[in-house]
Image (cartoon, coloured by chain):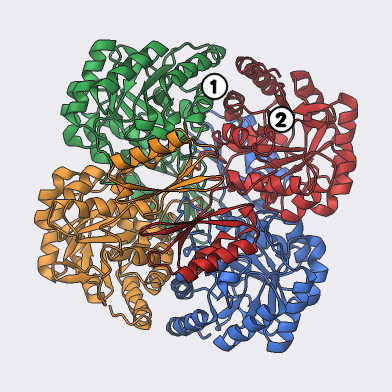
Chain colours: A red, B blue, C orange, D green
Amino acid sequence: MIIIMKHGATTEQVGNITQYIERWGCKPHISAGAETTIIGVIGDVRRVDRDQIALMDGVESTVRILRPYKLVGRDFHPMDTLVNVNGVVVGGEKIVVMAGPCAVESREQLIETAWAVKNAGASMLRGGAYKPRSSPYSFQGLGEDGLKIMAEARDLTGLPVVTEVMDPQMIPLISDYADLLQVGARNMQNFALLAALGKNNRPVLLKRGMMSSIEELLMAAEYILANGNDQVILCERGIRTFETYTRNTLDINAVPLVKQLSHLPMIVDPSHATGKWELVEPTSRAAVAAGADGLIVEVHPRPEEALSDGAQSLKPDRFAQLMRNIQPIAAALGRSL
Amino acid sequence: MIIIMKHGATTEQVGNITQYIERWGCKPHISAGAETTIIGVIGDVRRVDRDQIALMDGVESTVRILRPYKLVGRDFHPMDTLVNVNGVVVGGEKIVVMAGPCAVESREQLIETAWAVKNAGASMLRGGAYKPRSSPYSFQGLGEDGLKIMAEARDLTGLPVVTEVMDPQMIPLISDYADLLQVGARNMQNFALLAALGKNNRPVLLKRGMMSSIEELLMAAEYILANGNDQVILCERGIRTFETYTRNTLDINAVPLVKQLSHLPMIVDPSHATGKWELVEPTSRAAVAAGADGLIVEVHPRPEEALSDGAQSLKPDRFAQLMRNIQPIAAALGRSL
Amino acid sequence: MIIIMKHGATTEQVGNITQYIERWGCKPHISAGAETTIIGVIGDVRRVDRDQIALMDGVESTVRILRPYKLVGRDFHPMDTLVNVNGVVVGGEKIVVMAGPCAVESREQLIETAWAVKNAGASMLRGGAYKPRSSPYSFQGLGEDGLKIMAEARDLTGLPVVTEVMDPQMIPLISDYADLLQVGARNMQNFALLAALGKNNRPVLLKRGMMSSIEELLMAAEYILANGNDQVILCERGIRTFETYTRNTLDINAVPLVKQLSHLPMIVDPSHATGKWELVEPTSRAAVAAGADGLIVEVHPRPEEALSDGAQSLKPDRFAQLMRNIQPIAAALGRSL
Amino acid sequence: MIIIMKHGATTEQVGNITQYIERWGCKPHISAGAETTIIGVIGDVRRVDRDQIALMDGVESTVRILRPYKLVGRDFHPMDTLVNVNGVVVGGEKIVVMAGPCAVESREQLIETAWAVKNAGASMLRGGAYKPRSSPYSFQGLGEDGLKIMAEARDLTGLPVVTEVMDPQMIPLISDYADLLQVGARNMQNFALLAALGKNNRPVLLKRGMMSSIEELLMAAEYILANGNDQVILCERGIRTFETYTRNTLDINAVPLVKQLSHLPMIVDPSHATGKWELVEPTSRAAVAAGADGLIVEVHPRPEEALSDGAQSLKPDRFAQLMRNIQPIAAALGRSL
């Protein structure tokens, strides 16, 4: 952190600042110019509140130098983290595709979809048992029955399963059935949930909030790592902007930027990021080309009967086509499916 | 809902749609024009998924007519709802000001602030015991010790207290101490929390998410009402935009619009909505002038020592000035403080 | 500006930076810490491109200290600027209300509206002769005929008139008829237009772009002042956000913030900022309460026949009511209408 | 358009609406249900103002069915438009890369860059002679001298040149030198400029405004086509969002969506869309993978000396690497460079 003092700040004011800095275990470094005095702060400044310093007498402004995250940053951990989801490795050479319906609706629907996505080349099965819906009158998921169906689909097909957890109390139950626990976009800053997942031993799929910055996504992951769990996969799923022709705006910039800033794997959800099934394949190609480590795609055997997200779900044959068409893109980047 | 069929849609396709509509207990009303057939849907269409219909054969597009909320809407309940917080009525003639520190930091700090805001004319005391912080390394609140201090401050000053609840499991504990339970902006779509608060008997202060639309705010309140609790106060606290000179953008339009759409009281948080103490008084005046039923303001005896949100906290004398300066605005609208 | 060097930056690298700074007529001030070297830059750094320095060898990052504007800032000119529009002073004790139709549609329509808004207490008449419409198929305005009608309305009622200019070539013609030249939101960064208005002698009403930050608004005004014209009135007219229930989001924070940063008058356009006539009065009250120096309001005798913006236009009796209801708010701030 | 009447609307009110519709040359189609009357409007409804109808007595709401654009839409013109820029065809099988500096700074700089980008495989040379800068104190371009240098570079290398036009008066001069006239993001809704370019005979590169919707981009192109010029290339260059780690957010969704809605070619500017040179190559790969018809990339021989946009400019060797790395992506889509 750098503190810029006001023109004419007194020695006493500078002294108050330096004492304050030292109280937090940091070291001040004063450079007194003819017009302005600048104080550099050295040490672990992440705990020092810049806002408070900005309010102290004689301070003109303050400037943050360090990123606020640590455990998730490449500085701290230069090597890529590999996340192992029941045998499927995310973050390595292979691009991992997770696919399945928005919600588990019935045994038949899920098993049919599981075989279809497996045959098309998917590595993991997605499906919601507990659904966060913006209306209390919408279908809320099958609950534990849905979890049981997912576990059965895994046993039949061998695909590890990923499903959403919305409440810290649900973590033990869902961990009994699922291989990868998803934090949905609306819960990205549900810190009670993040802390509890940090103390759990299942890998976590952390979706970016629809209006959360890249820094907030990394800080949310930092919560999980700081609580003891480093098996975290990040997911870009579109952000909210002024554009209304699409459901969200896929922030493709975030893919290479997060890969540069962090060692954690980063995947993309083209279904939520666009909200239109016609855009899922072209944006999936773009995500792989930008360097994503995987995709999570909504697939439904009969989208027109889906209880949620039908408009953005692919039919199995379209999904198979998507898998064929991202293969040469992956190859162009020296990766495989 | 209105369904517009494609030019050349077949009788069979129209028939499929009408069967689908009837399956959900609604009545189709077909008007076949020379070029286009339009199907109006009558009945409780809130449960029918427009997205699915949009995917059915022969459908060009669909249009929503009804608002998706019901219990929170003025159509359903034309009279203003009054929320009674331990004797303080919100939503009536009196403009209710809640004030206090971002976080309870010590007994001394809170009691001192409580007397100061009471003497300036505040009707309720705010303070955080459990703090949702974007960094795991920031101060997270005093927990139950903070709740005890708040309850003591209420006993001393007579001011009802409002504090945040982040996790469904914490509701019973916090209800033992607090008079009004706050849902923070980051948890506005934490549906597990909303449902649990709906089954609780304490009034709720629901803050708009920084990334949430007015419709989503009303739908979040609908969750609480649909679960049995109609004592809900809404709060505009600024939304996230591209502007960086301020912490958030106070959506002043939302105040009269929500009052028009809903019977629930609506207050404004000028501290979070601006992030700068210099802007708190002018935006408080604006909020009252726009028709807000109250304010929630951060006040700290020594903002430069605050463990959070110092930059947007008022000192007690500035807060007293704010109270004096909103009084004539309230009077201009025929209201009192 | 402050330049933070990388850990281990060489003396030669620091030397390159200091030479570069001196080439732009600024003075470097080096403070070499044990871990990091920091270079403060003193002088008129507005011309130095921070982005380039950020690319030089050995540089970790750079930090801007100064605001990029100068002539429009309070530091440079602490006293409020008063803008005189043909005898009506904007920026003083009196709150100035400009009112009239979106577009001049006919002589009858404009003259009728002019008398109505004058009788209700407006100080200036607005009306568009050249309209920037997002569709080439929409009504584009009456052109010079519209200007003539506006001039006649001024002669009859004594109200100065404000109208939009879209193209540098049109400035002489429009200056022949109008008292105040408006730059519309879509042209806020039409720099050719801004420069030409700076060389003209008519006062300018500069509307904030719907996509422009407060800093960009001030920089756009800086263009006009830097070209020689300091008679500029700023106007907040709503920004584009994710919210869709309203046409734009009125950034009420911008009112007190701009008044703090700049000496120029600041008014508010509640019609465009909301897009709904029902919200115009409450947001007008809010604007005055927040410290705006005036309002610009769309009024039409028969909004349902308006060729543009009917949904956000007030009928004359509603406008008269607005004027009555903002009067006590103005009085509460020690101002008059 | 569909008009939904209020419950209990009178026959007279319905009659007023139908007369109004017929006045605009459209045909009403009434379907009177038991509870609601719905009026479908048939004909060229683009000229009818929905806002006015919404204000008429008895109207509950109105719904737009048609897209507001026509000439740029695929319905009107199903085949892809090919734009011929002095022999280089945009919109066909070949992916066209335009490259060069943000601004022409000197003859040496431009000629050197022109040869470098040509040798790396670029098909067109970009460079600014008149620069729209947000500060009046920044470098504003070399003006006509810059145009002459660009023309010389074309004569030497054979690369057609693209440069920005900011003012309708400049069109003849710039058309004397340049092959493709660019409308910058800040001028996307400068309707005077768009209309003038429609009457000119040079192809146009129309950049999306940083806060303009896809619909507004298409409507801006509609202005050019409606004025007689159908040689228009669209360009996605990033939109403004809340994210601050990048300069803009590249809306990759817009690429396949615009290709679906319109017959015009669509290219991507990864330099402005990211603001960071490290992100230019991965997002270029993504753009090609999503189906873009080309790229426009900032290249500078010495970015650290650039007078603008240095931070987002590639050095020639990095640009050559980009060209090599997008080649297999293009091949995967059956296209060539």
Helix or strand or loop: what does disc 1 sit on? helix
Q: Which x, y percent locates residue C129?
A: 20, 52
Label 1 is placed on what type of residue?
Ala
* Displayed quadrant of residue A28: bottom right
Kindly identify which residue carries mark 2.
A299
* Mark 2 neighbour density, 10 Å: few (under 14) some (14–19) many (20 or more): many
Q: Chain of mark 1?
A: D
* Disc sitting over residue D289 in the figure: 1
Q: Which x, y percent locates residue A173?
A: 89, 47
* Mark 1 neighbour density, 10 Å: few (under 14) some (14–19) many (20 or more): many
Spatial CA span between label 1 and label 2? 21 Å
Quarter occupied by the C terminus of chain D: top left
Helix or strand or loop: what does disc 2 sit on? loop
Looking at the picture, tell me which residue is in the foreground, B182 or C325.
B182
Residue at horizontal 68 percent and vertical 69 percent from the top: B128
Label 2 is placed on what type of residue?
Val
Q: Which x, y percent locates residue A181?
A: 79, 41
Instruction: Please tell me whether mark 1 or mark 2 is closer to you in this view.
Output: 1
Residue at horizontal 53 percent and vertical 85 percent from the top: B337
* Disc sitting over residue B113 in the figure: none
Apparent side of residue C153 relative to residue B15 in the rendered image (left or right) = left
Apparent side of residue A20 relative to residue B323 in the rendered image (left or right) = right
Q: Which x, y percent locates residue A329?
A: 61, 18
Q: Chain of mark 2?
A: A
